[in-house]
Amino acid sequence: MPKTAKSTAAPAAPAAPSFEELVAQIERQAAKLEQGELSLADALKCYEQATANLRQAYQIINQAEARVKILTGNAGELADWQEEKTDA
């Protein structure tokens, strides 16, 4: 019987959460913390996860802002739109 090669490729990493998913997670984590029913250890763990999600969300916002600045070409400021005049 011929030997079959085993795949050595690592499993695909899970997709990074979207901005909207991060915001929803942060809101759930904030609600848990506001309820005040978590132990100190669980509250700290929840807080750490929320701040990590917040950093990730800010990173997404900063990347989007950089893209907008590139697209506008005016250091992020949109130029006033002026209707083109046609000589008729």
Image: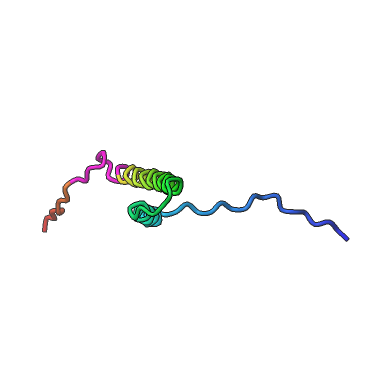
**Highlighted range, magenta:** 69-79
Q: Which of these two is toward me, 30 or 8?
A: 30
The majority secondary structure of the magenta stretch comes to loop
82 relative to 15 in the view: left or right: left
> Is the C terminus in the top left, top right, bottom left or bottom right quadrant?
bottom left
Q: Which of these two is toward me, 12 or 21?
A: 21
Measured as percent of width and height from the top left, residue 18 is found at 41, 54
For the point 26% across and 42% down, the residue is: 76
Measured as percent of width and height from the top left, residue 62 is found at 34, 43
70 relative to 86 in the view: left or right: right
4 relative to 56 in the view: left or right: right
Measured as percent of width and height from the top left, residue 34 is found at 33, 53
> Is the N terminus in the top left, top right, bottom left or bottom right quadrant?
bottom right
Does residue 76 belong to the magenta stretch? yes
Does residue 5 belong to the magenta stretch? no
Count the labels in the image.
Answer: 0
Q: Which of these two is toward me, 29 or 72?
A: 29
For the point 67% across and 50% down, the residue is: 9
Q: Quadrant of residue 77?
A: top left
Measured as percent of width and height from the top left, residue 86 is found at 13, 55
Q: Which of these two is toward me, 54 or 85?
A: 54
